[in-house]
Image (cartoon, rainbow, N blue to C red):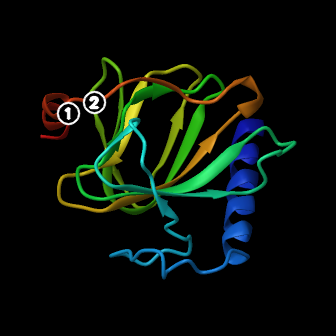
């Protein structure tokens, strides 16, 4: 129950932050309506395809969480990675997938929540025919950031999502 209350508190902080953020719609457009800004296009080897990121909240948070809105074009995805402190995803737009290493992929839709335990190797991203966005919350960020492992191959993606 305590953990559930923490997630709800974090989500409320995110929603309140979104209400206070300037509209960045001139930077890029989104096919779906969202209360959260799409952010800037990511140029990183840790993602495949086109992805945007809008970090939210203070960098020096005493809450020990980092959170942001991540938007993926169809088929875009993260690399395999893990989080020392765990992660929570709140799905806000479209269809996508989450897959823990060695497990079947889970189809995600707007309104779904994914709780990812500490150090679980996983990836997440858009379905082949849908834009996808989520609020990603990295928990216990004082224990370290994401540990990036390797790309999700096209073969792995196709096998997981078909």
For the N terminus, the quadrant is: top right
Please report whichever mark, 1 or 2, sits nearer to the chain's N-terminal start.
Answer: 2
Closest to the observer, 101 or 115: 101
Graded by Cα atoms within 10 Å as few (under 14), some (14 to 19) or many (20 or more), the crowding at tag 1 reads some
Graded by Cα atoms within 10 Å as few (under 14), some (14 to 19) or many (20 or more), the crowding at tag 2 reads many
Q: Is residue 75 above or below residue 26?
A: above
Query: SS of the residue at dot 1?
Result: helix
Residue shown at the point (77%, 48%) measured from the top left: 59
Query: SS of the residue at dot 2?
Result: loop
Cβ atoms under marks 1 and 2 closer than 8 Å: yes
Q: For this view, does 34 lie left or right of residue 15? A: left
The residue singled out by tag 1 in the image is 160
Residue shown at the point (52%, 65%) measured from the top left: 39
Which label belongs to residue 143?
Answer: none
The x, y position of residue 81, in whole percent, is 45, 26
The quadrant in which residue 117 appears is top right
Q: For this view, does 38 lie left or right of residue 96? A: right
Residue shown at the point (35%, 20%) measured from the top left: 101
For the C terminus, the quadrant is: top left
The x, y position of residue 142, in whole percent, is 77, 29
| Marks 1/2: CA–CA distance | 10 Å
The x, y position of residue 79, in whole percent, is 37, 32
Q: Is residue 106 above or below residue 19?
A: above
Camera-side mark, 1 or 2: 2
Closest to the observer, 11 or 80: 80
The quadrant in which residue 24 appears is bottom right
The x, y position of residue 83, in whole percent, is 57, 27
Which label belongs to residue 152?
Answer: 2
The quadrant in which residue 72 appears is bottom left
Q: How many marks?
A: 2
Residue shown at the point (18%, 40%) measured from the top left: 161
> Residue lying furthest front in this view?
43
């Amino acid at each position: 129950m305590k953990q559930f209350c923490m997630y709800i508190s974090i989500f409320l902080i995110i929603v309140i932050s979104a209400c206070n953020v300037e509209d960045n719609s001139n930077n890029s457009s989104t096919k779906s309506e969202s209360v959260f800004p799409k952010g800037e296009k990511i140029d990183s080897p840790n993602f495949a395809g086109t992805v945007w990121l809008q970090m939210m909240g203070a960098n020096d948070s005493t809450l020990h969480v980092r959170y942001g809105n991540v938007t993926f074009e169809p088929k875009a995805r993260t690399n395999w990675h893990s989080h020392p402190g765990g992660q929570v995803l709140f799905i806000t737009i479209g269809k996508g997938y989450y897959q823990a290493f060695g497990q079947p992929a889970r189809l995600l839709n707007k309104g779904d929540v994914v709780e990812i335990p500490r150090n679980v190797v996983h990836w997440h991203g858009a379905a082949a025919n849908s834009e996808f966005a989520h609020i990603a919350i990295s928990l216990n960020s004082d224990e370290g950031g994401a540990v990036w492992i390797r790309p999700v191959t096209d073969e792995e993606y196709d096998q997981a999502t078909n």
